[in-house]
Amino acid sequence: MMIARWSIEAKFGHKPEVIAEMQRWLRDIGSQVGWTPQRVRLLTGSIGVKESTIQSEIEIADLAELDAAWSKLGALPDHAAWSKALEPHVVSGTQRWEILRIIG
């Protein structure tokens, strides 16, 4: 098992909008690629990390599953529209993926 973690930084004063968009994405778009509430959680910065950080952690079986989900996402018009709706609320260039292995 692995965790695919996607991070983004909200612009100052835009954190509520980014969180709302992330929740909408999980409900309306992520669910289309099998990323259900049981496999995903949203996190935000508190102590020792920027308060503007918002992360989505998705539990995946392996890199093949992640690649398949990314391929499906790339073909969804709703995903492209969501990205454009999110863009005014985030710091450009801060999005990144981290992939971690679960031990045990």
Image (cartoon, rainbow, N blue to C red):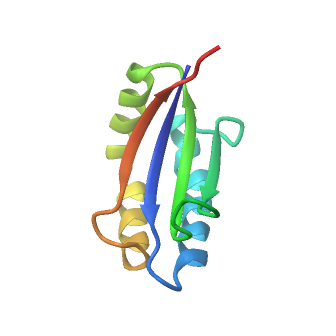
Q: Position of residue 58 (x, y in %)?
A: 56, 38
Residue sitting farthest toward the left: 93
Residue 28 at what x, y percent from top left?
58, 54
Residue plotted at (48% across, 83% down): 12
Task: Give the image location of residue 2, x and y in percent.
Answer: 52, 25
Residue that lies at the very extreme toward the front in this rendered image: 48
Relative vertical location of residue 52 with respect to residue 47 in this rendering, above or below = below
Q: Nearer the viewer, residue 94 or 63?
A: 94
Check the image and report above or below for 73 versus 102: below
> Which quarter of the figure has residue 37?
top right
- Give the residue furthest to the top: 104
Position above or below: 97 against 87: above
Identify the residue at the far right of this view.
Answer: 38
Is 53 situated left or right of 71 in this image?
Answer: right
Identify the residue shown where x is 42% and y is 29%.
Answer: 66
Q: Quadrant of residue 70?
A: top left
Q: Is residue 55 left or right of residue 39?
A: left
The structure residue drawn at horizontal position 46% and vertical position 19%, both measured from the top left corner, is 62
Residue shown at the point (59%, 17%) measured from the top left = 103
Q: Is 55 left or right of 104, judged from the image as shown?
A: left
| Residue 90 makes an appearance in the image | yes
For the N terminus, the quadrant is top right
State whether residue 75 appears in this view.
no
